[in-house]
Image (spheres, grey):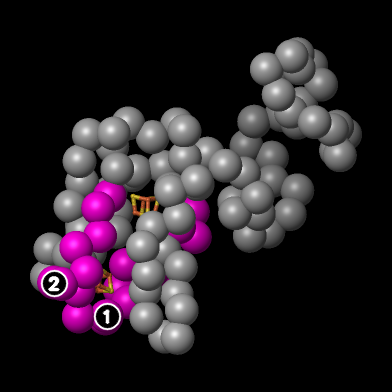
Amino acid sequence: MANNITIDETIVWQKITPGGDIYASGNSEEFHTGDWRTTKPIFIEDRCIQCLLCVPVCPDISIPIKAEKRTDFAYNHCKGCGICARVCPVNAIEIKAE
Ligand code: SF4
Ligand code: SF4
């Protein structure tokens, strides 16, 4: 299988791994998929009560935690799905157009 190859704009589809096949767990952080985004979550820190409900629902591990508090979004791989905003009980996340 095609592992350890550089995937860039010159690659042809026959050389990349088939869609949907995941060869390592927890690897979404390694892929900078943030440029796929059409909508973007905005963290409104003043409203946040640090309940951390948004953290486990993010499918892309895009809400970093530091000293037991969430910090701003890791936009390099956040895809803007909006799930985090849906679960936030105090509207501390707003979704805007990219
Ligand atoms: S918008 Fe989606 S991908 Fe981005 S931080 Fe929220 S849940 Fe994660
Ligand atoms: S769900 Fe909302 S209030 Fe809770 S940590 Fe996330 S942003 Fe803050």
Q: Quadrant of residue 52?
A: bottom left
Ligand 2 closer than 8 Å to label 1 CB: yes
- The front one of 4 and 14 is 4
- The front one of 75 and 24 is 75
- Residue 46, how many percent across, how many down? 15, 72
Q: Residues within 10 Å of mark 2 (few under 14, many from 20)?
A: few
Q: CA distance from mark 2 to mark 1?
A: 9 Å
- The front one of 49 and 17 is 49
Residue topped by disc 2: 47
**Residue at figure coordinates x 80%, y 31% from the top left:** 6
- Residue range highlighted in magenta: 41-62
- Residue 79, how many percent across, how many down? 41, 42
Ligand 2 closer than 8 Å to label 2 CB: yes
Is 78 left, or right, of 84 in this rendering? Answer: right
- What amino acid type is highlighted by mark number 1? Gln
Q: If the image is split into quadrants, where does the C terminus sit?
A: top left
- State the SS at label 2: helix
**Residue at figure coordinates x 26%, y 81% from the top left:** 51
- Residue that protrudes farthest toward the bottom in the picture: 67
Q: Work out whether residue 59 can be spotted.
A: no
**Residue at figure coordinates x 69%, y 40% from the top left:** 21
| Looking at the image, residue 37 lies above or below residue 60 | above
| Looking at the image, residue 23 lies above or below residue 73 | above
Residue topped by disc 1: 50
**Residue at figure coordinates x 22%, y 34% from the top left:** 97
| Looking at the image, residue 75 lies above or below residue 38 | below
- What amino acid type is highlighted by mark number 2? Arg
